[in-house]
Amino acid sequence: MSTAALTALDRILVILVAVSWGLAGGHAVVSRQAGPSALLVVAALLTTACRVAVTAALASAGWWFAGEKVLLALPLLLPPALAAAVVSLPRMLRGSFTPLTFVFPLAAAYAGVAGAAISVGMGYPLAPYPSVVLVLAVLGATAATWSMLTRRGPRGRAWRVAGAVVAALAVAWTGLSMWNARPAAALRLSPTGSVDVTELRGPAGDAVRRFELTAKPATITLSSGRRVEALTFNGLSPGPALRVRQGETVEVRLRSELADRGVTLHWHGYHVPNGEDGVPGLTQDAVREGGAFVYRFRADQPGSYWYHTHETPNLALQEGLFGTLTVDAAAPEGFDEPVALHTFGGALTVSVAGGPPADGTAVRTVAAGTPVRLRVVNTDNLPRTLGVSGVPYRIAAVDGVPVAGRVLTDEQARLAAGGRYDLVFTMPSRPVLLAAERAGLLLTPGSGAAPAPAAGPSLDITRYGTSGTRAPERFDRSYTWVLDRLVALRGGIPRLSHTVNGQVWPRVPPALVRRGEWVRFTVVNRSGELHPMHPHGHHVLVLSRNGVRAAPVWMDSFDVAPGEVWEVALKADNPGVWLSHCHELSHAAEGMTLHLVYEGVRSPFTLDAHNHPE
Ligand code: C2O
Ligand code: CU
């Protein structure tokens, strides 16, 4: 069974364990019937045995999948469950209903409820304070039950004091957590740092290439004629395609005509200086109506990138505040164009070179023999499966970085949310189809029938082609990010969230690094959903996926599927305080966002009413 399936099974078992012990204990107390009570205990023992087996299987898949179950949930559950088997069950069968017959199934039920709380609200790793509270609560409930069953208590004072202490601890913990999670909690990262992010800006002096982008609402028209209300840059979505030559200095002036929200520009995949990263509340304040912000950076990183707003991106990016950024190492030859995939008003569209977003298949004429490079950008929250048919092709770059890989015929490749593939081939004398699920781009030399969409197997991009970098032998630091779906306090209220190490943004502990270090991240997905992880300001070198060595390849948006474990390496060469998050932006908004912080760098910005980077 896959790790993802085991995790899902465990979520069911944890409920069954609590319910079955509750039924066993409750039935015995109320009915005192030997046969049925014994049967319920046997059923509860069976669910418990299943949970032990599933936990063991999860632990062998990786400690992150089972740590808190092995260390806390099972140690609470197994002693009363075993005592119920050894002490309570024989008594029930004999028809002897004494306090010893009842107390162990009931204690197992309390432990079962604690187990459910652990799996719904804590995850991995164990949080010390709530663990202590849970242990005390189970012991307290068991002791109280015992004293009621034996009618020997409550022994006045002692019990009440103990109960009051446990309750006070629980209330104090809840109150403290809610206070920390209050909406207005300012995010002040390393306030003692000596470098301010506002000092980490692009080069001053004469800009060679200037662009002006004005955010405003507009109605855009898809290729079918359908009109969609969008948020645009200069009335366009995708916004103007920015294209510059390596070595140029780029200056982009952002203005806002948005009445109801702020806007910023984040350069996805591009290693701009930190102060140009466009994260409201971290590297700047969001630009409000009538305001402006000037971004500057040197175009020293050739490849395919994109830009988008980072103010409430889950809403505003979806509605259209994005565009492509291409940095050419040399004059582009042949048909070399960014191709943006985006869902407008429920329709997946393809946008190419000036044309409107095509909700269907876009068509371009390309002469046979022309070199073609399609710089496909996935600007949606979900991955897209791409395939080229009608010609053998290569993936020449992943997330902007060149890779050397084999020629693909009819094979398909899944592109993560936020990711880019450069697909290259020479135009044949018949049409070629780039299919992206329900959307497509047909290149035709002028005649011939469109080929059927590629239908071959899906390739594993981590093993496709190497970008030539050797993974380091040793690392200066290591971090583990365990991604999960838990109830956590967001804005002071317990809500189902997307968590990292059991926490939600902005309380996920940051990854601290020092300039020059190689840092290893182990990214573990315990949830049932895909998480396209995206660190700002850096690419990561993918070392392995599920223990299988990668090519290795540099990526800035990588899909961690349920039950998967990815090992990636980051070279800390771009000082700042950087956001890292899931690019399924609704997950980022529900907590799956954290920070990479360089020692000595501080941010003066705060999460006020106008800054919502998540
Ligand atoms: Cu496209 Cu924070 O990212
Ligand atoms: Cu996610």
Image (cartoon, helix red, strand yellow):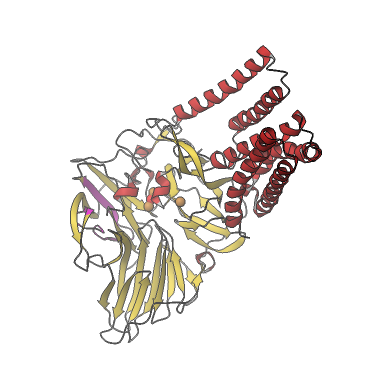
Residue 336 in picture, x, y percent from top left: 31, 71
Spot the residue most to the top: 157
Left or right: residue 214 versus residue 157 is left
Q: Which residue occupies the foreground of this view, 91 or 106?
A: 91
User: Residue 219, located in which quarter of the rendered image?
Assistant: bottom left
Query: Is residue 1 shown left or right of residue 94?
Result: left
The verdict on residue 235 being magenta is yes
Q: Position of residue 307 (x, y in %)?
A: 32, 54
- Residue 387 counted in the magenta span: no
Q: Is residue 333 visible?
A: no
- Nearer to us in this view, 127 or 154: 154
Q: Provide the residue span drawn in magenta.
A: 230-255
Seen at 70% across and 22% down, the residue is 147
Residue 482 horizontal/vertical position (percent): 55, 47
Q: Position of residue 155 (x, y in %)?
A: 70, 15
Judge whether 548 appears above or below 318 on screen: below
Looking at the image, how many numbered discs can be counted on the residues? 0
Which quadrant of the structure image shows residue 208? bottom left
Q: Is residue 224 visible?
A: yes
* Viewer-proximal residue among 93 and 407: 93
The quarter in which the C terminus is drawn is top left
